[in-house]
Amino acid sequence: MSTFPDKFRLDGRTALVTGSARGLGWEMAKALAEAGARVLLHGRTRDRITPRLEELRRAGFAADALAFEMSDRSAMAAEVAASGPIDILIHNVGERDRRPFADIAADDFARLVDVDLSAAHALVKLVAPGMIERHWGRLILVTSIVADLAVPGAVSYVAAKGGLAALTRALAAELGATGITSNSLSPGFFATETNAQLIASPAGERQRERCPAKRWADPSEIAGAALFLASPAASYVNGHALIVDGGVSATYLA
Ligand SMILES: NC(=O)c1ccc[n+]([C@@H]2O[C@H](COP(=O)([O-])OP(=O)(O)OC[C@H]3O[C@@H](n4cnc5c(N)ncnc54)[C@H](OP(=O)(O)O)[C@@H]3O)[C@@H](O)[C@H]2O)c1
């Protein structure tokens, strides 16, 4: 007899998690593999992703790897086509540009928006037709609390993540009747490798203090939210932005 927790299992599903060599992407990929999905890891190059692939396979999980740079749409299309049907897309790659507005040239802005927003659209174009055909799919786009709350010194990142949140809602509206759900996952302050310098700085200490939880999140704390959105348990959750931020965006002062 199946029980309610079985609705969090992903047996028989294949999940692509972009940017899963490290950070939040790796934590989400590992959790989905543990829940029974065949996981497609992704990195810029095979070299970067191979150690993680071996780790999952050694643990007895079904896993394969895709390698492409987000800005290279031909490589993206070829790798996705070669991977077989994809049921769950967690699009996690997101570059930052922590420079003042005055220092970000038009080309820099366009490049970041291409990687953080347009590449998501390109990936969805590749995976959605198969999901529609099979009447089941999960699109999970990793945004940020900056999609709703701006910060100084990140103009292109804030704009791209805001666009990504809007793209998620547009996809939810348009694809809702096809068996696909589209949701965004919005992290707050996570202690990933990329944030190591920031965390050690006075600005990082102010962020910790600003958070009601009074700490940076461990990267593994994103995994439960990702698994929920990917799972059959979230079958009627569509167009939602799931915030995982220790309460930052719920508060004016903490
Ligand atoms: N950490 C946080 O506190 C936080 C907060 C809000 C939102 N987020 C969002 O959550 C996501 C993951 O964050 P994270 O801190 O775990 O990120 P991360 O450490 O920067 O990792 C991102 C992954 O994406 C890959 N990647 C970056 N640019 C790429 C490109 N152009 N083409 C292909 N792969 C690329 C990286 O590959 P390499 O290993 O080759 O560099 C890396 O594996 C991002 O979208 C970020 O915006 C994070």
Image (cartoon, rainbow, N blue to C red):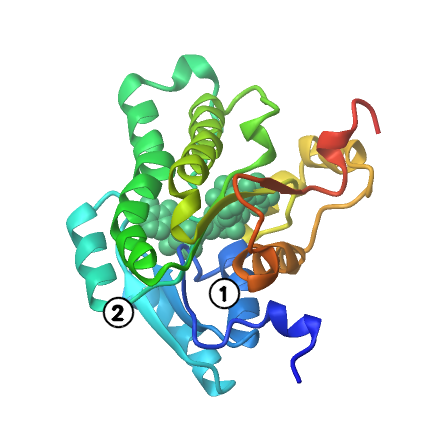
Q: Quadrant of residue 179?
A: bottom left
Residue 13, image x, y percentages: 43, 71
Q: Which residue is pictured at 82% across the width and 24% down the height?
A: 253
Residue 202 vs 4, above or below: the answer is above
Dot 1 beta carbon under 8 Å from ligand 1: no
Identified by mark 1, the residue type is: Ala
Would residue 83 appear left or right of 55 to someone viewing this image?
left
Q: Which residue is mark 2?
A: 84
Residue 17, image x, y percentages: 42, 59
Q: Which residue is mark 1?
A: 29
Residue 76 vs 173, above or below: the answer is below
Residue 76 vs 210, above or below: the answer is below
Callouts 2 and 1 close, C-beta under 8 Å = no
Of badges 2 and 1, the one in the foreground is 2
Q: Which residue is pictured at 51% across the width and 39% down the height?
A: 143
248 or 234: nearer the eye? Answer: 234
Would residue 184 appear left or right of 120 to someone viewing this image?
right
**First-in-chain label (2 vs 1):** 1
Residue 160, image x, y percentages: 42, 29
Q: Which residue is pictured at 46% across the width and 29% down the height?
A: 166
Q: Which mark is residue 51?
A: none
Determine whether the residue tagged by mark 1 lies in a helix, strand or loop. Answer: helix
